[in-house]
Amino acid sequence: MNRLKGLNVPYVIFFLWNVLMIFAVHGLTFQHEAGRGVSGNGNPGILILFPSLLTFLIQCIWTVSLSKWWLYDQRQRWGDKVHVIVPLLAVLLCVLSVFLELQMIENLRTQLGGFTNDPSSAVYRFGWLNQYTNTLYYNSPILLFGLSLSIFIGWLMERSVRKSSS
């Protein structure tokens, strides 16, 4: 039980909720199968997409706050090592998540035969938010990017707090 003492259990539960929301958006987004036509079932994924984005935003704000104060508290324990590693790792994870998101977009474009302005596409003349593209707006690379950017912002805020207290 001592290991859980330093762990912010509500934060971890909220993080797991966000991961569950990614699976929910993915589960309610239709996968286009070539030659089968377009689904006429509407867009059930949109029902979970907007609450997912709201919880994602709350998670990012919470991450900024926690990382700022965690880094401020850990300065005495770890010195300057952590203040070089944390922002570097956060930026590298942001770059990785952008690469993964671009790869996801390209895979979906290939699966659909193009996007909304391509006449041979399964989603020709649909809006960008449709039953096949919900996963572009909330997925694991977006969660990774948001949390990494939040940690980087928390690091920047910690530096400003540290400089103003000096």
Image (spheres, rainbow, N blue to C red):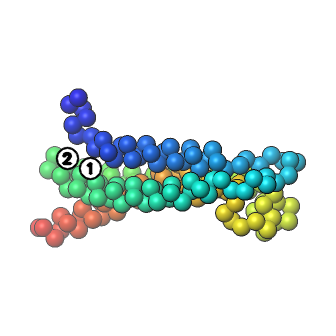
Q: Which residue is mark 1?
A: 82
Identify the element where label 1 is drawn. helix
Res. 105 image quadrant: bottom right
Res. 121 image quadrant: bottom right
Q: What's the amino acid at mark 1?
A: Val
Q: Nearer the viewer, residue 128 or 86?
A: 128
The relative height of residue 155 versus residue 5 in the rendered view (above or below) is below
User: Disc 1, disc 2: CB below 8 Å?
Assistant: yes
State the quadrant of the C terminus. Answer: bottom left
Q: Residue at x 18, y 68 (%)?
A: 163
Q: Which residue is mark 2?
A: 78
Q: Position of residue 165 (x, y in %)?
A: 12, 67
Q: Nearer the viewer, residue 16 or 97?
A: 16
Q: Between marks 1 and 2, how big is the CA–CA gap?
A: 6 Å
Residue 63 in view: yes
Q: What's the amino acid at mark 2?
A: Trp
